[in-house]
């Protein structure tokens, strides 16, 4: 769905990147029907169950409470409302302590209206709300599964290796086959209590915690998911003074072309992990919370924004050199389209 038409470098560099009941908290062996499936089939079944962005999903309205945490652990509360009529017709609105952000898709365009300081939070929300993307393992090597205890629930866990730097652990409830935890070198998404809400063939995780470098960054608590009936007449009317970009359900995000002396990615070692650092010559860009590239349909950089740790846009002497970066453009309908690429600092 790509609710936010941006792609975090961490996703790009790391590879592609039932019954709705509370999970049992036993340490028992997995049911025969679960154990008979191979690991790839288990992950694929989980993806199909929680991927609500496909043609099998019935129109729905979702309401959720959000908590975004800053570097000091201070929380900001938000309220999210999503009206999903179809893959190419949906509206998402979030109220953050008096600030309102809006995204709207109608046909082949997406309209967005939000303050720049919300960009990093939106990126985290995108990863959290669309965690099913992390179950795409087509380009990875899956290990044999093993039983683990995840928050008191028996889980079957597999490791997926994409390359020397990129690994992901996926833990599925042995009773339901639904995700309990997904984590990689920098992120961890946990479905608290393994609790899911049902809607038709799909399952929505009720409580999700998103952690970055072992610190909780965002919590999503879904209040309700109901069939969408009689939405307001103006629900899908593009808002005034909102920017728009091309959009399609199967858009492939832009990819940074690595190499060269002016721009490269360095894999910095950490505690049992590695992480990408965007370098300009010999200087890292880690002092910024993230760097945003406006990538044209030809892959050339049209603009660069630098965000400080508070999410505010600041100036940088690196801009001229970063404008010389090259990307494979985003692809929509077989054609290159304009899109944004966000490189998040490992410190943030």
Image (spheres, rainbow, N blue to C red):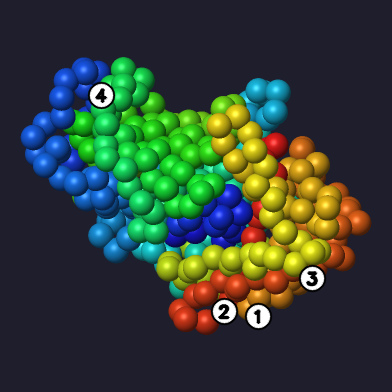
Residue 324, label in figure: 3
Q: Which secondary structure, mark 4?
A: strand
Mark 3: few/some/many CA within 10 Å (<14, 14-19, 20+)? few
Q: Are marks 2 and 1 in contact (CB under 8 Å)?
A: yes
**Residue that label 4 marks:** 154
Q: Position of residue 105 (x, y in %)?
A: 50, 64
Residue 298, label in figure: 1
Per the model, the C-alpha gap separating discs 2 and 4 is 45 Å
Q: Position of residue 83 (x, y in %)?
A: 42, 53
Foreground mark, 2 or 4, reads 4
Q: Position of residue 64 (x, y in %)?
A: 45, 37
Q: Are marks 2 and 3 in contact (CB under 8 Å)?
A: no
Mark 1: few/some/many CA within 10 Å (<14, 14-19, 20+)? some
Residue at (46, 37) in percent of width and height:
183
Give the side of residue 197 with respect to residue 320, left or right.
left
Q: Earlier in the sequence, mark 2 or mark 4?
A: 4
Asked whether 35 or 271 is in front, the reply is 271
């Amino acid at each position: 769905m790509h609710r936010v038409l941006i792609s975090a470098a961490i996703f790009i560099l790391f590879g592609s990147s039932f019954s709705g009941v509370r999970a049992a908290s036993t340490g028992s062996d997995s049911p025969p029907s679960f154990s008979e499936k191979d690991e790839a089939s288990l992950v694929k079944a989980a993806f199909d169950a929680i991927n609500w962005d496909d043609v099998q999903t019935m129109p729905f309205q979702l309401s959720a409470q959000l908590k975004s945490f800053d570097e000091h652990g201070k929380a900001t509360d938000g309220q999210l409302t999503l009206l999903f009529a179809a893959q190419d017709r949906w509206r998402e609105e979030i109220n953050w302590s008096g600030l309102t952000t809006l995204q709207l898709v109608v046909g082949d365009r997406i309209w967005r209206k939000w303050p720049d300081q919300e960009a990093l939070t939106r990126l985290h929300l995108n990863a959290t709300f669309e965690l099913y993307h992390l179950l795409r393992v087509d380009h990875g090597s899956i290990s044999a599964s093993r039983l683990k205890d995840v928050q008191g629930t028996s889980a079957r866990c597999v490791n997926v290796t994409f390359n020397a730097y990129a690994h992901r652990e996926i833990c599925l409830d042995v009773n339901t086959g639904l995700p309990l935890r997904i984590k990689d070198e920098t992120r961890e998404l946990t479905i608290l209590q393994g609790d899911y809400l049902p809607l038709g063939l799909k399952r929505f995780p009720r409580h999700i915690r998103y952690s970055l470098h072992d610190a909780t960054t965002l919590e999503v608590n879904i209040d309700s998911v109901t069939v969408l009936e009689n939405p307001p007449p103006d629900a899908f009317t593009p808002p005034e003074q909102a920017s728009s970009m091309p959009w399609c359900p199967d858009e492939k995000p832009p990819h940074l072309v690595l190499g060269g002396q002016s721009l490269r990615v360095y894999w910095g070692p950490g505690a049992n992990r590695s992480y990408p650092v965007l370098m300009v010559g010999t200087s890292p860009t880690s002092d910024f919370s993230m760097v945003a590239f406006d990538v044209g349909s030809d892959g050339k950089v049209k603009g660069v924004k630098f965000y400080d740790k508070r999410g505010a846009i600041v100036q940088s002497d690196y801009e001229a050199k970063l404008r010389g970066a090259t990307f494979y453009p985003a692809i929509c309908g077989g054609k290159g389209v304009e899109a944004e690429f966000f490189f998040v600092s490992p410190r943030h």
